[in-house]
Image (cartoon, rainbow, N blue to C red):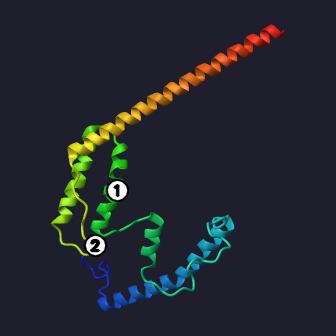
Amino acid sequence: MSGTPRDQEPVTDPSEERKAERKAARARIEQQHTWVDLQVRQAMERGEFDDLPGAGKPIEGLGATHDPDWWVKKLVEREHITVLPPALQLRKDDAELDAHLDTLGSEREVRRDVEDFNARVIRARYTPVDGPPLVTMPRDVEETVARWRERQSARLAEAAERAARRAAEEEAAAAARGRLRRWLRRRR
């Protein structure tokens, strides 16, 4: 009996189906605002909007001229992103390189970072760029590593000196406490 017309779905016009789908979608969209309003109202009743940052303050930038890139500027400001021309970025990196190298713990890491810096300088030299001229020179790896070793040994010597001073101060304080105890015992 599967071949009877009653068992088969009625054949409908595809354009009628599309019209019905559009009508249903339009009805959902028209009702969506009431659902959203209900969700917001319930959240307000639960107190989920209490103590939001900026509550009671005017919205920053409201009323200013329209800027289509406002979100990019806010992202750059919030994340502290700086985009410098390659020549300036390399100058900045060169100025900060010794401080960065001093945070590293092994000579291998120092060599790797200096070689990476040199590769970026050489790459920038052979890449045509707009902006200021590139005046940063590659660093001599062996000389930079030798200076890092000197600073490292100076830091270690300074740390040893601080530890010796601290130990001497603790010893002097212990001796002073011992004298104070002996004096207090004699006074009794």
Query: What's the residue at 31%, 56% (across, down)?
Result: 94
Q: What's the residue at 58%, 77% (across, down)?
A: 60
Q: Label 1: which residue?
A: 95
CA gap, disc 2 to disc 1?
17 Å
Q: Is residue 95 above or below residue 156?
A: below
> Eyeballing the image, is 127 above or below 154?
below
Q: Secondary structure at mark 2?
A: loop
The residue tagged 2 is: 132
User: Considering the image in quadrants, where does the C terminus appear?
Assistant: top right
Furthest toward the right, the residue is: 188
Task: Identify the residue shown where x is 50% and y is 25%.
Answer: 164
The kind of residue on which mark 1 rests is: Ala
In the rendered image, residue 186, in percent from the top left (x then y), is placed at 80, 8
**At x 24% / y 77%, what residue is drawn?**
3
- In the depicted structure, whether residue 174 falls above or below residue 23: above
Query: Which residue sits furthest left?
Result: 126
**Amino acid at the residue labelled 2:** Pro
Quarter residue 12 falls in? bottom left
In the rendered structure, the answer to whether residue 93 lies left or right of residue 29 reads left
Residue neighbourhood size for the residue with mark 2, other residues' Cα within 10 Å, grouped as few (<14), some (14–19), many (≥20): few
Residue 6 coordinates in the image, percent (x, y): 32, 81
- Where residue 82 appears, as percent x and y from the top left, is 39, 66
Front-most of residues 23 and 115: 115
